[in-house]
Image (cartoon, helix red, strand yellow):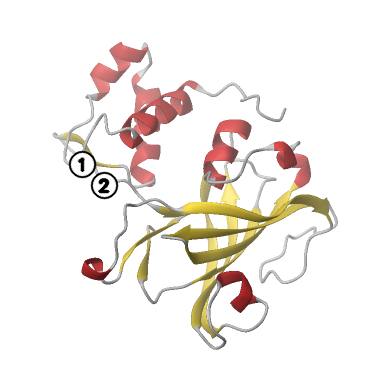
Amino acid sequence: MSDTPVRLPHYQHLYETLRQQLHKGVYEPGNLLPSEKELQQAYNLTQPTVRQALSMLADEGYIKKYQGKGSVVQPLPIGSGMLSIEPQFPSEVLFDGKIQTEILQKPIVGNFPEGFLFVPANPSGLFYYLERIRLVNNEVIFYEKIALPAQEVPDFHKQKLENRSLFGVLRSRYNVIVKGGEEKVWATAATLPLTDIMRIELGTPVLRLEKRIETNRPHLTFYSSLYARTDMYLLQGRF
């Protein structure tokens, strides 16, 4: 399976097409997307299919839908999973919106790993486990540990994850769409080995975010344990 994409439903294919166009700047913030009727004609799709694709874009913050006006393009969401970031002090930080991703631990298969706040109801199955950091201007902003049920994402260890969105890989390779989930957040002081991983001083305040993330597949719930620096950047989420 490795790099061979699965066949996407029509609504998701339209969603992916429009999403790529938005990232390429085909439609700028404040512009209107083509109307539902225009999209139906351009892609030979039904109205419910077009509406489902637009609803997905709206849920992820790419557009806002207004009755009688249409779909207005929003600034591109930038972030980690369901989170976005923005400079806390814009005049002091040069930020072009690019986030680099480095994989510290490539995906390995084993029992459900320790250290996650949320655990599966049946943790006896096998899980892929990986670790990654995400950087802005060569500074580590996020450190994240992730566990996914191995039987739901075959050959996940063969996927290219450096500088790629995990949600994007799941979406394009496995037809998996993140639907939401549960999250717990608290502040803590950085200790070893976190300080070495995030390249920060002992005692530096960080946010810890534990997530149980649900998808369009009833048996594919995955788990994230994430640490975030917020001294220079604000976290922004949608709910």
Secondary structure category for the residue under label 2: loop
Q: Residues within 10 Å of mark 1 (few under 14, many from 20)?
A: some
From the top left corner, tell me how far across and down residue 159 is, in percent.
67, 38
Q: Name the disc covering residue 123, or none.
A: none
In this rendering, the answer to whether 65 lies above or below 137 is above
Type of the residue with mark 1: Pro
Secondary structure category for the residue under label 1: loop
- For the C terminus, give its image quadrant: bottom left
* Residue at far left of view: 68
Say which residue appears at 29% left-offset and 19% top-offset: 39
From the top left corner, tell me how far across and down residue 170 is, in percent.
59, 40
Taking depth in this image into account, of 133 and 35 the one nearest to the observer is 133
Q: Name the disc covering residue 75, or none.
A: 2
Q: Name the disc covering residue 29, or none.
A: 1
Q: Are marks 2 and 1 in contact (CB under 8 Å)?
A: yes
Q: CA distance from mark 2 to mark 1?
A: 5 Å
From the top left corner, tell me how far across and down residue 141 is, in percent.
48, 66
Tell me which numbered mark, 2 or 1, is placed earlier along the sequence. Answer: 1
Q: Is residue 230 left or right of residue 64?
A: right
- For the N terminus, give its image quadrant: top right
Say which residue appears at 57% left-offset and 87% top-offset: 202
In this rendering, the answer to whether 152 lies above or below 38 is below
Say which residue appears at 57% left-offset and 65% top-offset: 143
Q: Does residue 153 appear anywhere in the picture? A: no
Q: Does residue 49 appear anywhere in the picture? A: yes
Type of the residue with mark 2: Pro
In this rendering, the answer to whether 143 lies above or below 64 is below
